[in-house]
Amino acid sequence: MTAVEAVSGLLLLAGAGFYLAGTVGLLRFPDVYTRLHALTKADNLGLGFLTLGLALQASSLAAALKILLIWPLVLAASAAVSYAIARRAEQLGLKPWQGRAQRG
Amino acid sequence: MKTVWLRATVFAVTWWVLTEGRADAWGVGLIFVVLAVIASRRLWPPAAYRLSLAGLLGYLGFFMVQSVRGGFQVAAMAMRPRLALAPSLFEVPLRLPPGPAQRLLTGTLSLLPGTLSVRLEGATLCLHALDARLPIEAEVRTAEARVARLFGIAL
């Protein structure tokens, strides 16, 4: 295994770790707003690590840049979609979760 | 005219990246570069804003660092055995003019640690904060200043 492959492997593992954390947050966080936080932030960083790790293994410079291009494009979509969901949730009158005391 | 060539270069490089440098794709590519320049002039008239290169680099650096912070923060919150969240809605009056600058800030804040954009109305941005005990307003002001510098806007 070369050094590049090792670094690439570590980056891919880190990316997978953040996706796992984001998914755990999605399952554990109490309401739509907090869940959006988990998805947008953890997946943003997770995808950053994944694209970096994959770009290191790309066959050419253009192919590496193409993989890296995925990151800003997905981020733009992620920001727009989370805004659309949060805005709609607020329009529907969903109140943000305020703490355990108020539940039930 | 300078902006036309600059945009054409950016789109041509994008095409080169998308086709992974294949020479036989340039026929179609040239057509799309021209179409993209025309569309970009419609959607973003050159006179409206001038992006600053130093501002762009500053914004990108800031965004990367904050992405790492945000990812670690939310991952730590999700993995903690007992959830310690103190969410709340905030309203922040923006100093940026309406248009692309405000929209970029709205999107950026959704990806930055602790904040999620919920509603942009006029010059007021409604945010959801994951932990209201953190200095939300200060973070918004920092991001706002970065976006302002990118667009060459004086706040």
Image: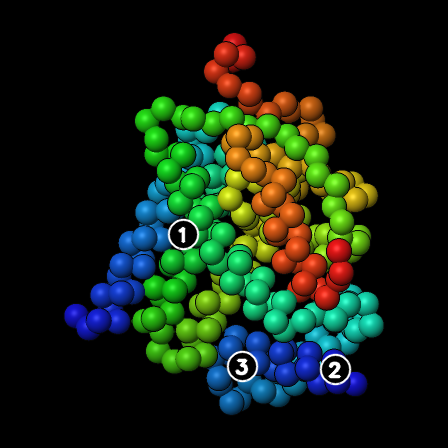
Confirm whether circles 3 and 1 share one chain.
Answer: no
Instruction: Work out whether residue B57 or residue B79 is closer to the camera in this orientation and state it.
Output: B57
Residue B15 figure quarter: bottom right
In space, the residues marked 3 and 1 are separated at their CA atoms by 26 Å
Q: Is residue B143 visible?
A: yes
Residue where numbered disc 3 is placed: B16
Q: Residue at x 71, y 64 (%)?
A: B151
10 Å crowding of disc 2: few (<14), some (14-19), many (20+): some
Residue nearer the viewer, A39 or B72: B72
Q: Is residue A36 visible?
A: no
How far across and how far down the image is residue A19, in percent? 38, 46
Distance Cα–Cα, label 1 vs label 2: 36 Å
Residue at the image point whose x is 70% and y is 59% from the top? B148
Quadrant of the image occupied by residue A13: bottom left
- Residue type, label 1: Gly
| Label at residue A46 | 1
Can you tell which mark lies on residue B4? 2
- Please give left or right for residue B145 compared with residue A60 in the image: right
Provide the chain ID for the residue under circle 3: B
Which SS class for mark 1? helix
Is B136 placed above or below B18 here?
above
Instruction: Tell me which residue sits at (61%, 34%) in the image.
Output: B128
Tags 3 and 2 in contact by the CB under 8 Å rule?
A: no
Residue that appears at 75% across and 53% down: B96
Query: Can you say whether A13 is above or below B10 in the image?
Result: above
Mark toward the start of the polypeptide (3 vs 2): 2
From the top left corner, tell me how far across and down residue B114 is, in percent.
53, 39
Q: Is residue B27 left or right of residue B122?
A: left
> Between B73 and A77, which is closer to the camera in this rendering?
B73
